[in-house]
Amino acid sequence: KIDKVPDDLGIEYIKYFKDKFDKIGNSETFIIFDISDQYIGGLLMTKGKKGLIKTTYVTTDRIHGYEIDKEIIDNLITEGNPIFDKEREWLLSETSILEGLKWSIDKIKKNGS
């Protein structure tokens, strides 16, 4: 049982998120963060007009948490073409997302010292 995610693992995940976010371009990108034996969940993100990012929390039971690691998740999504159940949707500014990621890393580093 993990009571707290190690700081370095938290920072690595935020860097993974930022890397995926930076590669959105004109296509939809899936960023995983909810991993279960029965399903996976994450954010589908698409760049929209005026610097807004359409962000939808989705899940699928066609891919299971025990099947994945960060090297193969993109292939599973592309090749498996899973049907996602859409839960919630937001329009977020690109600036607020990037500032939030930076804030999170700074907060982890500050609390970890």
Image: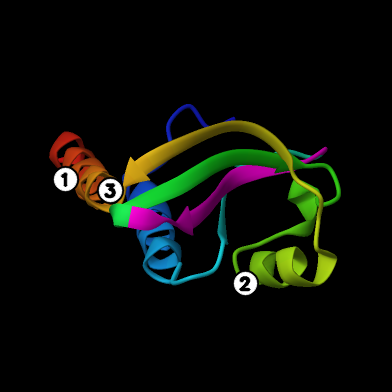
Disc 3 to disc 2: CB gap under 8 Å: no
**For residue 101, which numbered disc appears in the image?**
3
- Exactly how many numbered labels are in the figure? 3
Q: Amino acid at mark 2?
A: Glu
Which residue type carries mark 3?
Answer: Leu
Please, what secondary structure does the residue beneath circle 3 have? helix
Looking at marks 1 and 3 on the same chain, the residue that comes earlier in the sequence is marked by 3
Main secondary-structure element of the magenta-colored stretch: strand
Residue 31 location, quadrant: bottom right
In which quadrant will I find the N terminus? Answer: top right
Residue that badge 1 annotates: 106
User: Which contiguous range is marked in magenta?
Assistant: 38-49
Q: Counting residues from the N terminus, which is met first, the one under dot 3 or under dot 2? A: 2
Q: Is residue 48 above or below residue 96?
A: below
Task: Report how far apart the C-alphas of labels 3 and 2 lie in the structure.
Answer: 22 Å
40 in magenta:
yes
Q: Residues within 10 Å of mark 3 (few under 14, many from 20)?
A: some
Q: State left or right for residue 69 relative to residue 63.
A: left
Q: Which numbered disc flags the more N-terminal residue, 1 or 2?
A: 2
Neighbours of disc 2 within 10 Å: few (<14), some (14-19), many (20+): few
Q: Kindly tell me whether residue 41 is visible in this rendering.
A: yes
Q: Residue shown at 72%/59% (left/top)?
A: 68
Specify whether 14 is left or right of 39. left
Residue that label 2 marks? 71
- Residue at position x 53%, y 34% in the image: 89
- Expressed as whole percent of the image width and height from the top left, the position of residue 94 reads 29, 52
Q: Nearer the viewer, mark 1 or mark 3?
A: 3
Q: Does residue 33 appear in this view?
A: no
Q: Going 38% across and 47% down the picture, which residue do you hit?
A: 10
Instruction: Out of 24 and 104, give the one closest to the viewer.
Output: 24
Q: What's the residue type where badge 1 is placed?
A: Asp
Identity of the residue drawn at 19% across and 38% down: 107
